[in-house]
Image (tube, rainbow, N blue to C red):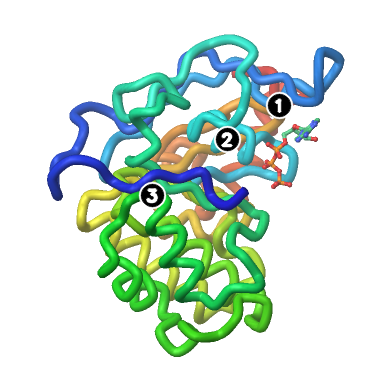
Amino acid sequence: MPDVRAPAGGAPGARAPGPAVRATDLRVVRGGRRGTLALDGVTLTVPSGVIVGVLGPSGSGKSTLLRAIVGVQVITSGSIEVLGLPAGSTGLRRRLGYVTQAPSVYGDLTVQRNLRYLGAVVGAPASDVGRVLDEVDLVDCAHRRVDSLSGGQRSRVSLAAALLGTPELLVLDEPTVGLDPVLRRDLWDLFGRLRERGTTLLVSSHVMDEATRCDRLLLLRDGHVIADDTLPGLLARTGTSDVDAAFLALIEGQPPNGRGS
Ligand SMILES: Nc1ncnc2c1ncn2[C@@H]1O[C@H](COP(=O)(O)OP(=O)(O)OP(=O)(O)O)[C@@H](O)[C@H]1O
């Protein structure tokens, strides 16, 4: 299944008041009853109109948190509200864009046909196809089959699909994996432009230096949020000069498994 997304509803510029996401004491067990406690009492608020970086080591719960926010993850307890509605509500389908780590477009169709099809599914105007191709810098690849593209190009097609309909909240799970430094920079520039027009972005990464491009950071470890702060706030609080060092300083103050704060 491609990205579980939804195009923007309402008039341009009409944004939901209040935070984009509010989670309270969220617990998620993955893999059945005897499975893994992937999120363990997560409480957080994501303000609207900002870029929030969701950072943490592999297995810390980043994807699970994003899945819970877009409503594709069964939660065990707690609550999660997105754009003022319970996560997973039908009313959110047209207001969210979600890009997973897995390919989310059809390999045997051209880029343009994918976008036309996915745009029609979410009710985006036909003119959106040209706009999103331009935004992800894939105009020259419009008529190529997706399975002939490089990995980086393919992930930009998925991102283009998520931009169809101008969603209010974009949830991107490790969108820069496998991209070279130039493409990564271009993508972060695009995220900045999207933020300027009022979109809220939640972007997961385990590349800590991408933190410098975010307005706020959520640091996860073993299913816990160990920091929810701006980068300057985080560095000041930990007396460190980069996110890696801040992360280490935070976990050094915790018991094993990060069950401390
Ligand atoms: N389908 C699943 N069944 C059982 N356990 C799972 C499943 N998916 C994830 N988990 C477990 O849930 C925990 C959180 O995983 P999650 O994928 O959310 O982490 P992540 O921070 O996104 O990792 P990565 O950076 O490697 O993608 C991990 O312990 C993982 O092993």
Toward the viewer: 68 or 94?
Answer: 94
- The residue shown at (34%, 78%) is 134
Residue position for label 2: 67
Q: Secondary structure at mark 3?
A: helix
For residue 182, above or below residue 242: below
Residue position for label 1: 38
Label 3 vs 2, first from the N-terminus: 2
Q: Secondary structure at mark 2?
A: helix
- The residue shown at (40%, 28%) is 90
- The residue shown at (39%, 59%) is 119
Q: CA distance from mark 1 to mark 3?
A: 31 Å
Q: Amino acid at mark 1?
A: Ala
Toward the viewer: 233 or 59?
Answer: 59
* Quarter, ligand 1: top right
Q: Secondary structure at mark 1?
A: strand
Label 1 vs 3, first from the N-terminus: 1
Mark 1 nearby-residue class (10 Å; few <14, some 14–19, many ≥20): many
| Residue 221, image quadrant | top right
Estimate the x, y position of residue 210 in percent, counting from the top left. Answer: 51, 59
- Name the mark nearer the viewer: 3 or 2: 3
Label 2 vs 1, first from the N-terminus: 1
| Residue 20, image quadrant | top left
Tell me: is circle 2 under 8 Å from ligand 1.
Answer: yes
Mark 2 nearby-residue class (10 Å; few <14, some 14–19, many ≥20): many
Tell me: is circle 1 under 8 Å from ligand 1.
Answer: yes
Instruction: Indicate which disc residue 122 carries.
Output: 3
- Name the mark nearer the viewer: 2 or 1: 2
Tell me: is circle 3 under 8 Å from ligand 1.
Answer: no
Q: Residue furthest bottom?
A: 140
Q: Amino acid at mark 3?
A: Val
For residue 238, above or below residue 34: below
